[in-house]
């Protein structure tokens, strides 16, 4: 058998599955992405097997020389079974991953939460090199986090530690989260739920201010059509109402970040996810401005991840690299 030295990193999201083949040091040699095949629970593992074979073919690497397949996926997970349990963004109750992939490829296959993987990826490849205390936070369709504390990646009993999107930031529970509970951070500040926050606030805001706003004109008063990007685009054009709402969302984000800082005491927080990556200044400035009002611990550096959209793939590769050492 040939020497096992290549690694596959997989970033499994609700819409896309992204994957890359890397060398033993984690240098990416080939990359691809496809829409997630949601025709059945089994289709997803079959799709990953197919992608692994394509990546190997394109790079002239034999499947037998793969050291491992590391899958970074949104949860909730059962890491012992290597499966997703009632995943919030896929239409199945149970999605087995590591066993069917290992059976078909005969390659060690690992699964961890995508944000935990991202924290690991940040530490090995990104801004977290040499740091023992760092947190990764994603503000995208949902909100999630991964934490390395005293050099240890936090996983939890089922692999769902640091599910910070479901921290309660509003005890009155005005908005309902995708998980079914009320008042969670994600219910106010994630890409999917920012429109709910804006709709709620527009009912409370002065009618005149509302009618004059660029945001209201942009969506022609059709509040059901509102997207989070409508809000950020109107704010970038200087719309007063939109800037106010972005600032309010920033205060809520600052509360979330402060909870994280008080809980994990990191020296660095890196931020990813499409909402943050596309609107870096509008998201990060209010967090940096307000976080001190809520955090007790010495503040960490807060920056956007230098790994951008590839952080999930690097996370997947990192799982295999870490388990080897
Ligand atoms: Zn929730």
Image (cartoon, helix red, strand yellow):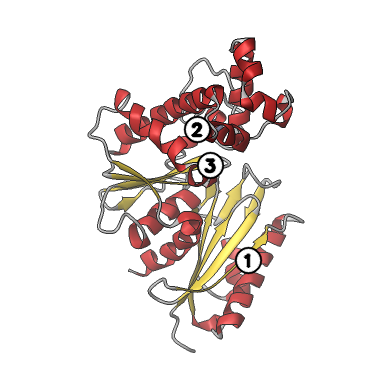
Residue 111 visible somewhere in the drawing:
no
Q: Quadrant of residue 216?
A: top right
Which residue shows up at 63% across the image and 27% down it? 215
Query: x%, y% of residue 101?
Result: 60, 67
Which residue shows up at 65% across the image and 49% down it? 94
The numbered mark at residue 166 is 2
Q: Residue furthest bottom?
A: 1
Which residue shows up at 53% across the image and 42% down it? 275
Q: CA distance from mark 1 to mark 2?
A: 29 Å
Which residue shows up at 42% across the image and 73% down it? 27
Q: Is residue 144 above or below residue 310?
A: above
Query: x%, y% of residue 174?
Result: 57, 18
Left/right placement of residue 48 relative to residue 27 reads: right
Look at the numbered disc 2 and give the secondary structure of its residue. Answer: helix
Mark 3 C-beta closer than 8 Å to ligand 1? no
Q: CA distance from mark 2 to mark 3?
A: 18 Å
Classed neighbour count for the residue bearing mark 1: other residues with Cα under 10 Å, few (<14), some (14–19), many (≥20): many
Query: x%, y% of residue 158?
Result: 48, 46
Q: Is residue 264 above or below residue 79?
A: above
Left/right placement of residue 113 relative to residue 194 reads: left
Mark 2 or mark 3: name the one nearer the start of the chain. Answer: 2
Classed neighbour count for the residue bearing mark 2: other residues with Cα under 10 Å, few (<14), some (14–19), many (≥20): many
Look at the numbered disc 3 and give the secondary structure of its residue. Answer: helix
The numbered mark at residue 48 is 1
Q: Nearer the viewer, residue 25 or 94?
A: 25
Labels 3, 1: front one? 3
Residue designated by label 3:
275
Q: Are marks 3 and 1 in contact (CB under 8 Å)?
A: no
Mark 2 C-beta closer than 8 Å to ligand 1? yes
């Amino acid at each position: 058998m040939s020497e096992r030295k290549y690694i596959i990193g997989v970033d499994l999201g609700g819409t896309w599955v992204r994957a890359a083949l890397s060398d033993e040091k984690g240098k990416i040699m080939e990359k691809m992405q496809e829409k997630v095949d949601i025709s059945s629970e089994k289709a997803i593992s079959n799709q990953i097997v197919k992608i692994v074979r394509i990546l190997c073919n394109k790079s002239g690497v034999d499947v037998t020389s793969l050291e491992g397949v590391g899958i970074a996926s949104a949860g909730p997970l059962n890491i012992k079974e290597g499966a997703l349990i009632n995943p919030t963004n896929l239409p199945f109750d149970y999605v087995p991953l590591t066993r069917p992939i290992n059976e078909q490829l005969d390659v060690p296959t690992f699964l961890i939460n995508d944000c935990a993987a991202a924290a690991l990826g940040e530490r090995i490849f990104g801004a977290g090199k040499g740091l023992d205390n760092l947190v990764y936070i994603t503000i995208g369709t949902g909100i999630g986090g991964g934490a390395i504390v005293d050099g240890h990646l936090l996983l939890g009993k089922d692999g769902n530690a640091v599910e910070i999107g479901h921290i309660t930031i509003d005890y009155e529970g005005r908005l309902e989260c995708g998980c079914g509970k009320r008042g969670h951070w994600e219910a106010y500040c994630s890409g999917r739920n920012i429109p709910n926050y804006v709709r709620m606030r527009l009912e409370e805001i002065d009618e005149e201010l509302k009618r004059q706003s660029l945001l209201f004109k942009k969506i022609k008063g059709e509040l059901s059509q509102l997207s989070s990007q409508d809000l950020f685009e109107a704010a970038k054009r200087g719309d007063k109402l939109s800037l106010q709402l972005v600032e309010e969302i920033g205060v809520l984000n600052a509360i979330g970040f402060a909870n994280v800082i008080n809980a994990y005491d990191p020296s660095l927080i890196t931020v990813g996810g499409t909402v943050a990556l596309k609107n870096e200044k509008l998201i990060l400035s209010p967090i940096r401005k307000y976080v001190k009002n809520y955090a007790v611990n010495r503040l960490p550096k807060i920056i956007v991840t230098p790994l951008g959209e590839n952080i999930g793939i690097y996370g997947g590769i990192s799982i295999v690299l870490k388990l080897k050492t």
